[in-house]
Amino acid sequence: MQRYLLSVLSLVISTAVWANQEVTTINGCKLAPSSNCAGMDLRNADLSNMDLRKINFNDADLSGANLRHAQLDLSTFNGANLSGANFTRASLQQASIRGAKLDKTNFTAINGWALMGQGAEGKKTDFNAANLDFARFSGSKLPSANFNAANLEMAWLNKSDLRKATFIDANMQESKMSEANMAKANMTNARRHYATFLGTFMEGCTACPLDW
Protein backbone atom coordinates (compact mmCIF):
# COMPACT_ATOMS: atom_id res chain seq x y z
CA MET A 1 0.00 0.00 0.00
CA GLN A 2 2.81 2.41 0.91
CA ARG A 3 4.51 1.79 -2.45
CA TYR A 4 1.19 2.40 -4.24
CA LEU A 5 0.63 5.71 -2.40
CA LEU A 6 4.15 6.85 -3.19
CA SER A 7 3.59 6.06 -6.89
CA VAL A 8 0.32 8.02 -6.95
CA LEU A 9 1.95 10.97 -5.15
CA SER A 10 4.83 10.95 -7.62
CA LEU A 11 2.39 10.97 -10.55
CA VAL A 12 0.42 13.88 -9.05
CA ILE A 13 3.60 15.90 -8.48
CA SER A 14 4.89 15.16 -12.00
CA THR A 15 1.55 16.19 -13.52
CA ALA A 16 1.50 19.41 -11.53
CA VAL A 17 5.04 20.29 -12.55
CA TRP A 18 4.26 19.60 -16.22
CA ALA A 19 1.08 21.69 -16.07
CA ASN A 20 2.93 24.63 -14.56
CA GLN A 21 5.79 24.62 -17.04
CA GLU A 22 6.09 27.94 -18.80
CA VAL A 23 5.72 27.96 -22.56
CA THR A 24 8.79 29.35 -24.29
CA THR A 25 8.06 32.83 -25.64
CA ILE A 26 10.19 34.78 -28.12
CA ASN A 27 9.27 38.37 -28.96
CA GLY A 28 5.67 37.76 -27.92
CA CYS A 29 5.35 34.46 -29.78
CA LYS A 30 4.25 31.59 -27.53
CA LEU A 31 5.93 28.53 -29.00
CA ALA A 32 3.17 25.97 -28.57
CA PRO A 33 0.75 24.14 -30.87
CA SER A 34 -2.00 26.31 -32.39
CA SER A 35 -0.41 29.58 -31.24
CA ASN A 36 -0.81 32.76 -33.27
CA CYS A 37 2.60 34.23 -34.12
CA ALA A 38 1.58 36.00 -37.31
CA GLY A 39 3.87 38.85 -38.31
CA MET A 40 6.30 38.31 -35.43
CA ASP A 41 10.09 38.67 -35.46
CA LEU A 42 11.71 35.26 -35.01
CA ARG A 43 14.92 35.85 -36.92
CA ASN A 44 17.61 33.27 -36.07
CA ALA A 45 15.36 31.69 -33.41
CA ASP A 46 16.10 28.13 -32.29
CA LEU A 47 12.82 26.22 -32.70
CA SER A 48 14.42 22.83 -33.29
CA ASN A 49 12.63 19.69 -32.04
CA MET A 50 9.59 21.72 -30.91
CA ASP A 51 5.96 20.65 -31.29
CA LEU A 52 4.46 23.57 -33.22
CA ARG A 53 1.62 21.86 -35.03
CA LYS A 54 -1.13 24.17 -36.36
CA ILE A 55 0.85 27.28 -35.39
CA ASN A 56 0.27 30.49 -37.37
CA PHE A 57 3.51 32.02 -38.66
CA ASN A 58 1.87 33.96 -41.50
CA ASP A 59 3.95 37.01 -42.53
CA ALA A 60 6.45 36.31 -39.72
CA ASP A 61 10.20 36.79 -40.14
CA LEU A 62 11.88 33.41 -39.58
CA SER A 63 14.96 34.14 -41.65
CA GLY A 64 17.92 32.13 -40.37
CA ALA A 65 15.75 30.23 -37.87
CA ASN A 66 16.54 26.66 -36.83
CA LEU A 67 13.50 24.37 -37.21
CA ARG A 68 15.34 21.07 -37.53
CA HIS A 69 13.18 18.09 -36.56
CA ALA A 70 10.28 20.38 -35.56
CA GLN A 71 6.68 19.11 -35.72
CA LEU A 72 4.94 21.61 -38.01
CA ASP A 73 2.03 19.64 -39.48
CA LEU A 74 -0.91 21.89 -40.49
CA SER A 75 1.09 25.01 -39.64
CA THR A 76 0.95 28.13 -41.84
CA PHE A 77 3.85 30.25 -43.06
CA ASN A 78 1.98 32.18 -45.76
CA GLY A 79 3.93 35.26 -46.82
CA ALA A 80 6.62 34.56 -44.22
CA ASN A 81 10.33 35.24 -44.70
CA LEU A 82 11.97 31.81 -44.43
CA SER A 83 15.22 32.73 -46.18
CA GLY A 84 18.17 30.84 -44.75
CA ALA A 85 15.94 28.90 -42.33
CA ASN A 86 16.80 25.26 -41.64
CA PHE A 87 13.89 22.78 -41.72
CA THR A 88 16.01 19.63 -42.06
CA ARG A 89 13.90 16.54 -41.26
CA ALA A 90 11.00 18.63 -39.97
CA SER A 91 7.43 17.39 -40.46
CA LEU A 92 5.38 19.79 -42.61
CA GLN A 93 2.47 17.57 -43.60
CA GLN A 94 -0.42 19.66 -44.96
CA ALA A 95 1.39 22.83 -43.92
CA SER A 96 1.25 25.98 -46.04
CA ILE A 97 4.11 28.20 -47.23
CA ARG A 98 2.12 30.04 -49.90
CA GLY A 99 3.88 33.19 -51.07
CA ALA A 100 6.76 32.67 -48.64
CA LYS A 101 10.30 33.88 -49.31
CA LEU A 102 12.62 30.86 -49.61
CA ASP A 103 16.09 32.12 -50.56
CA LYS A 104 18.54 29.35 -49.60
CA THR A 105 15.97 27.75 -47.28
CA ASN A 106 16.94 24.21 -46.29
CA PHE A 107 14.12 21.66 -46.54
CA THR A 108 16.42 18.62 -46.69
CA ALA A 109 14.58 15.35 -45.98
CA ILE A 110 11.39 17.01 -44.70
CA ASN A 111 8.10 15.16 -44.65
CA GLY A 112 6.11 17.62 -46.73
CA TRP A 113 3.16 15.46 -47.79
CA ALA A 114 0.54 17.78 -49.33
CA LEU A 115 2.64 20.87 -48.53
CA MET A 116 1.04 23.97 -50.06
CA GLY A 117 3.61 26.32 -51.62
CA GLN A 118 1.77 28.13 -54.39
CA GLY A 119 3.46 31.40 -55.29
CA ALA A 120 6.47 30.81 -53.06
CA GLU A 121 9.68 32.49 -54.23
CA GLY A 122 13.32 31.72 -53.57
CA LYS A 123 16.70 31.08 -55.14
CA LYS A 124 18.75 27.98 -54.41
CA THR A 125 16.08 26.45 -52.15
CA ASP A 126 17.15 22.98 -51.01
CA PHE A 127 14.56 20.17 -51.17
CA ASN A 128 17.15 17.38 -51.34
CA ALA A 129 15.57 14.01 -50.43
CA ALA A 130 12.36 15.75 -49.31
CA ASN A 131 9.01 13.98 -49.38
CA LEU A 132 6.80 16.33 -51.44
CA ASP A 133 4.18 13.75 -52.39
CA PHE A 134 0.96 15.61 -53.38
CA ALA A 135 2.65 19.00 -52.77
CA ARG A 136 1.32 22.07 -54.59
CA PHE A 137 3.83 24.65 -55.87
CA SER A 138 2.00 26.01 -58.91
CA GLY A 139 3.13 29.50 -59.89
CA SER A 140 6.18 29.36 -57.65
CA LYS A 141 9.54 30.90 -58.54
CA LEU A 142 12.31 28.51 -57.52
CA PRO A 143 15.26 28.95 -59.91
CA SER A 144 18.31 26.80 -59.10
CA ALA A 145 16.32 24.78 -56.55
CA ASN A 146 17.66 21.37 -55.53
CA PHE A 147 15.08 18.57 -55.83
CA ASN A 148 17.66 15.79 -56.09
CA ALA A 149 16.34 12.46 -54.77
CA ALA A 150 13.09 14.17 -53.73
CA ASN A 151 9.69 12.47 -53.91
CA LEU A 152 7.50 14.66 -56.15
CA GLU A 153 4.94 12.01 -56.99
CA MET A 154 1.65 13.67 -57.96
CA ALA A 155 3.08 17.10 -57.04
CA TRP A 156 1.94 20.16 -59.01
CA LEU A 157 4.50 22.71 -60.24
CA ASN A 158 2.50 24.10 -63.17
CA LYS A 159 3.60 27.53 -64.42
CA SER A 160 6.57 27.55 -62.04
CA ASP A 161 9.98 29.08 -62.68
CA LEU A 162 12.37 26.13 -62.34
CA ARG A 163 15.30 27.39 -64.40
CA LYS A 164 18.53 25.57 -63.58
CA ALA A 165 16.72 23.45 -60.97
CA THR A 166 18.03 19.92 -60.46
CA PHE A 167 15.84 16.81 -60.24
CA ILE A 168 18.59 14.19 -60.33
CA ASP A 169 17.28 10.79 -59.14
CA ALA A 170 13.96 12.39 -58.17
CA ASN A 171 10.62 10.59 -58.25
CA MET A 172 8.46 12.75 -60.55
CA GLN A 173 5.85 10.15 -61.40
CA GLU A 174 2.43 11.66 -62.18
CA SER A 175 3.69 15.15 -61.38
CA LYS A 176 2.21 18.17 -63.18
CA MET A 177 4.84 20.46 -64.75
CA SER A 178 2.78 22.06 -67.51
CA GLU A 179 3.87 25.51 -68.72
CA ALA A 180 6.77 25.56 -66.28
CA ASN A 181 10.11 27.12 -67.21
CA MET A 182 12.70 24.34 -66.95
CA ALA A 183 15.44 25.93 -69.05
CA LYS A 184 18.83 24.43 -68.18
CA ALA A 185 17.26 22.16 -65.54
CA ASN A 186 18.66 18.67 -64.93
CA MET A 187 16.44 15.58 -64.76
CA THR A 188 19.14 12.91 -64.97
CA ASN A 189 17.81 9.53 -63.79
CA ALA A 190 14.52 11.07 -62.66
CA ARG A 191 11.49 8.78 -62.75
CA ARG A 192 8.77 10.58 -64.72
CA HIS A 193 6.18 7.98 -65.67
CA TYR A 194 2.86 9.66 -66.45
CA ALA A 195 4.25 13.10 -65.56
CA THR A 196 2.77 16.01 -67.56
CA PHE A 197 4.95 18.57 -69.35
CA LEU A 198 2.40 20.22 -71.63
CA GLY A 199 3.81 23.54 -72.87
CA THR A 200 6.87 23.30 -70.59
CA PHE A 201 9.91 25.29 -71.75
CA MET A 202 12.95 22.98 -71.73
CA GLU A 203 15.69 24.74 -73.71
CA GLY A 204 19.09 23.48 -72.53
CA CYS A 205 17.49 21.02 -70.11
CA THR A 206 19.43 17.83 -69.40
CA ALA A 207 17.47 14.56 -69.70
CA CYS A 208 14.15 16.37 -70.07
CA PRO A 209 11.37 14.77 -72.19
CA LEU A 210 11.78 17.00 -75.21
CA ASP A 211 9.20 14.98 -77.16
CA TRP A 212 6.34 16.68 -75.32
Image (tube, helix red, strand yellow):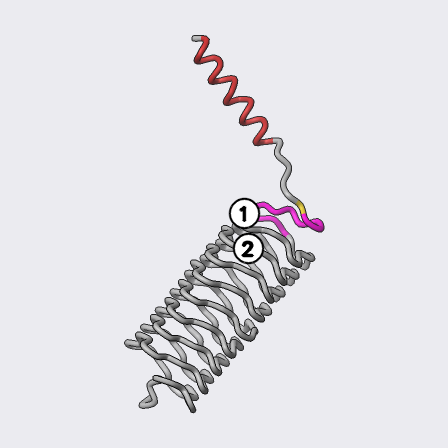
Image location of residue 66, percent across then percent down: 58, 56
Image location of residue 139, percent across then percent down: 51, 77
Q: Please tell me which residue lies in front, 158 or 191.
A: 191
Q: Is residue 8 left or right of residue 155?
A: right
Instruction: Give me the residue at 49% from left, 65% from top.
Output: 116
Q: Is residue 197 above or below residue 156?
A: below
Q: Which mark is residue 67?
A: 2
Q: Is residue 84 left or right of residue 91?
A: right
Provide the major secondary structure of the magenta segment. Answer: loop
Q: Is residue 210 above or below residue 170?
A: below
The quadrant of the picture occupied by the C terminus is bottom left
SS for callout 1: loop
The quadrant of the picture occupied by the N terminus is top left
Are the residues flagged by discs 2 and 1 in contact, CB closer than 8 Å?
A: yes
The image quarter in which residue 43 lies = bottom right
Q: Is residue 18 above or below residue 150?
A: above
Amino acid at the residue labelled 1? Met
